[in-house]
Image: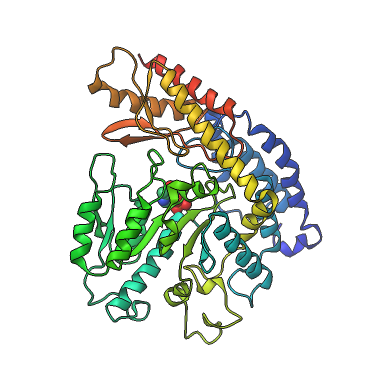
Amino acid sequence: MADPLHELDSAAQPLALVHDAAAPYLASLATRPVVDPDAAKLLDGLGGALPETGTGGPETVERLLGIGTAAATASSGPRFFHFVTGGATPAALAADWTAALLDQNAFARISSPLAHEVETVALDWLRQLVGLPDGWGGALVGSATFANFTSLACATHWWGERQGVDVADTGLVGLPRMPVLSGGYVHSSSRKALQMLGHGRNTVEVFARDGVGRVDLAALERRLAGCGPAVIIANAGEVNAGDFDPLADLADLAGRYGAWLHVDGAFGLFAAVSPRSRHLTDGIERADSITADGHKWLNVPYESGFALIREPSRLGRAFGMPGAPYLPGPQDPAGGYGLFGPESSRRSRAMPIWATLAAYGRAGYREMVERHLDLAQRLARLVDEAPDLERLADVPLCIVCFRARPHGVPEKDLDDLNRKLGADLLADGRVFAGTTVYDGKVALRPAIVNWRTTATDVDAFVAVVRSLVARLV
Ligand SMILES: *Cc1c(COP(=O)(O)O)cnc(C)c1O
């Protein structure tokens, strides 16, 4: 096979193969191990020299499906508790295929009125889902890292205005350092965003009052009082235990001292979906920018983050590309989201968001979030009841932070034991969770955000962990 034009008449054939593979793969997710250690050798089948003559679409896709369905990490299944990782709802997955089928460029209205309109609706539905007032706007981006980048770019532009400079035009040269203040929950991706924006990741000044990282409001306020316009980064849902910074207190400080308040709610923003957890996000409506992820608790496929901005016109000022005569400008009716965020040409990542919200609605998401809240409490209870496990933190949301603490093992040996446990868990592959260091102690921190996860999976997780602990002592 050479020129793809030879497949003009059979272009849908490889798609049919994907369709045929879908049902058995999706059905297998409930029980398959997260990783099959024996499948690793299949990855060799991807390599070799670049083919001179290709094998054609159907044969190639068959090969990819063979390797893929065996060697994939089943992170879209119900037993993947590592990081904070959602799956893909049935409607979102099918809409993602639709987005690939239609292959729209969601750069601007002129490139695709369809993609533009779906994105406009999806952003507004997300705003409504989390209860933000009318007038907020946003940008769909590839990830929460890019949502932090987008938000902090707007913050940078805002701060530049206070220095009398349009930093989108002339950059940061000659300006003092932009003060960035945070508690200890600040996520490494906010630091990465600051490093990409030219502030440097070490620009964050951390005000923590304990080893967990809880914010020291008094110290942060003293610094705010002395530093002029500043950016505060708050976390709605930190990754170790799902805890929240006191957003209302930080919003008060931002108001009092004229600071920009950015909230990283990559997964925690979805606490606002349930009346049971909404209080954790109180005050978030007074933020200037918010980060969240669609590929976590919303359960849409990668790559799906979003930034919500209180004054959406700031996006065009920070990300517009004036001066290219063949492109529309930010205010041009032919323009669109490619001028309101870091990417220009982009896929229609709004389609899965639109579809999942249309399919399951506000009530469906509330029900799912509340199921996960219940499952996190169930997991906490199982940990509390197990004599060989010790919970290290409260469980306000969907993460349970705990460690193994078998009888007779001295405290000084527990970090090593838990590191070993974490490695054994990943090598075992039946369930997945990662380790962290919480208040100086090595711990596991399973997170529950997958729409498929049920009590059976949580019980299986605890059973696997305890069986591995038993082998360590
Ligand atoms: C996951 C996460 C991020 C980064 O998200 P990506 O989508 O992987 O870029 C940022 N902040 C928090 C709190 C997170 O949980």
Left or right for 334, reference 262: right
Residue located at (24% from left, 47% from top): 208
Residue 282 in view of the camera: yes
Colour setup of the view: rainbow
Residue located at (25% from left, 60% from top): 203
Residue 146 in view of the camera: no
Q: Which residue occupies the foreground of this view, 379 or 65?
A: 379
Residue located at (28% from left, 44% from top): 213
User: In the rendered view of the protein, which quadrant contains the N terminus?
Assistant: bottom right
Instruction: Name the spot of residue 392 as percent of width and height, x first.
Output: 34, 29
Residue 401's image quarter? top left
Q: Which residue occupies the foreground of this view, 8 or 32?
A: 32
Instruction: Name the spot of residue 406 as percent of width and height, x first.
Output: 34, 16
Q: Which residue occupies the foreground of this view, 403 or 3?
A: 403
How many numbered marks have been drawn onto this rendered protein structure?
0
User: In the rendered view of the protein, which quadrant contains the C terminus?
Assistant: top left
Instruction: Name the spot of residue 73 as percent of width and height, x first.
Output: 55, 38
Left or right for 26, reference 264: right
Q: Which residue occupies the foreground of this view, 224 or 410?
A: 224
Left or right for 388, reference 348: left
* Whether residue 266 is situated above or below residue 101 in the rendered picture: above
* Whether residue 455 is situated above or below residue 347 in the rendered picture: above
Left or right for 392, reference 142: left
Instruction: Name the spot of residue 9 as percent of width and height, x first.
Output: 81, 61
